[in-house]
């Protein structure tokens, strides 16, 4: 990645959660690789096929008891002081009459990728953007059902969601400081609206920026190596929290919660691969979760994990 970005060669990259698999596609390789990409400023979609069927969607979430097993492990570690925020995720079997490709074409999101009939995601979350030597990140933490009265205000003032948001902002400010100088929080706790077929959600985000340090200039691979895994889908402190996650979740995240991005020869736009559906054999699984702190209630977290099993198709 460093080599190509120093040569200013445009490419698309995909990095899995544990940064074990890195895939790079130069611009002319994207089409034949079975990749479909739709970002705000880069898209491989020529024409959108018409969807002539009504969405059918059934999810089979695990039981509360099953969810509780890992949740308790996470809470125990938080009580012991091993972590103060853990992003706990689950894998849920789903059934739908749409193919992964149809889900890609007909869902609306900031970032969408379909990859070789293996996975599709429709993510609202930017990881980092790099523009003219400046690096930006937009941690998104905290969601609420938008149909509730005063939902945005409730979200902004919810003690647990606020604590979670502060933690992630702090974590990412520290992370950016490894590759950038003059790191600052530009916007704090602004609310995004996310429209979905099942229900509308509000999500809370912040914007953090810095100037890339001279030794990281043009070295996209080195920057990613320092910043990954992404703090918003891991927790803090990072190394210990990763151990807790691997123990509590009991399944492979794979590419879910990894990052992917487009380097146009100069600037970068990248996202966290969340809102993620993966094919295993003939079955489909939706991976979703949320941040756990000492204030988390089991039933609320279980509900949040289920709330996120949706497709944004209208």
Image (cartoon, rainbow, N blue to C red):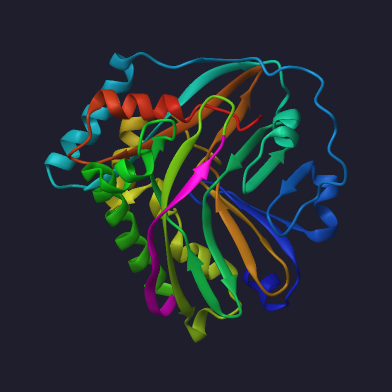
Taking the image as shown, residue 198 lies to the left or right of residue 104, namely left
> Which image quarter: residue 89?
top left
Taking the image as shown, residue 133 lies to the left or right of residue 92, namely right
Q: Magenta residues: mostly which secondary structure? A: strand
> Which image quarter: residue 42?
bottom right
Task: Indicate yes or no whether the magenta region holds residue 186.
Answer: yes
* In-front residue for pair 301/76: 301
* In-front residue for pair 273/5: 273
At horizontal 28% and vertical 52% (from top left) the residue drawn is 236
Q: Position of residue 291 (x, y in %)?
A: 33, 41
Q: Position of residue 30 (x, y in %)?
A: 80, 51
Taking the image as shown, residue 236 lies to the left or right of residue 2, namely left
At horizontal 39% and vertical 36% (from top left) the residue drawn is 144
Q: Is residue 257 above or below residue 8?
A: above
Q: Is residue 255 above or below residue 10?
A: above
Q: Is residue 173 above or below residue 86?
A: below
Task: Indicate yes or no whether the magenta region holds residue 191.
Answer: yes
Q: Could you tell me which quadrant the C terminus lies in?
A: top right
Q: Could you tell me which quadrant the N terminus lies in?
A: bottom right
Q: Position of residue 138 (x, y in %)?
A: 46, 59
At horizontal 38% and vertical 31% (from top left) the residue drawn is 148
Q: Which residues are magenta?
A: 180-195
At horizontal 29% and vertical 27% (from top left) the residue drawn is 300
């Amino acid at each position: 990645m460093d080599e190509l970005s120093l040569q200013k060669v445009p490419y698309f990259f995909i990095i899995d959660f544990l940064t074990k698999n890195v895939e790079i596609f130069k611009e002319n390789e994207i089409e034949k690789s079975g990749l479909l990409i739709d970002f705000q400023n880069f898209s491989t979609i020529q024409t959108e096929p018409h969807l002539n069927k009504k969405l059918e969607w059934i999810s089979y979430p695990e039981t509360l008891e099953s969810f509780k097993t890992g949740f308790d492990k996470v809470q125990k570690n938080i009580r012991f002081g091993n972590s103060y925020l853990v992003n706990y995720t689950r894998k849920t079997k789903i059934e739908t009459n749409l193919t992964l490709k149809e889900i890609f074409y007909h869902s609306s999101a900031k970032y969408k990728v379909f990859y070789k009939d293996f996975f599709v995601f429709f993510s609202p979350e930017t990881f980092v953007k790099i523009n003219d030597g400046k690096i930006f990140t937009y941690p998104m933490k905290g969601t609420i059902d938008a149909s509730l009265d005063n939902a945005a205000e409730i979200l902004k003032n919810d003690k647990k969601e606020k604590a979670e948001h502060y933690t992630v902002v702090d974590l990412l400010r520290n992370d950016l400081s490894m590759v950038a100088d003059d790191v600052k929080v530009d916007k704090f706790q602004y609310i995004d609206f996310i429209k979905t077929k099942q229900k509308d959600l509000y999500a809370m985000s912040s914007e953090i920026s810095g100037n890339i340090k001279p030794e990281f200039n043009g070295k996209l691979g080195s920057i990613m190596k320092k910043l990954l895994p992404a703090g918003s889908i891991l927790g803090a402190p990072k190394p210990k929290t990763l151990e807790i996650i691997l123990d509590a979740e009991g399944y492979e995240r794979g590419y879910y919660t990894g990052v992917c991005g487009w380097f146009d020869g100069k600037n970068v736009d990248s996202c966290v691969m969340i809102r993620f559906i993966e094919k295993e054999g003939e079955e489909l699984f939706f991976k979703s979760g949320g941040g756990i702190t000492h204030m988390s209630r089991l039933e609320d977290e279980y509900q949040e994990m289920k709330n996120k099993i949706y497709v944004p198709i209208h």
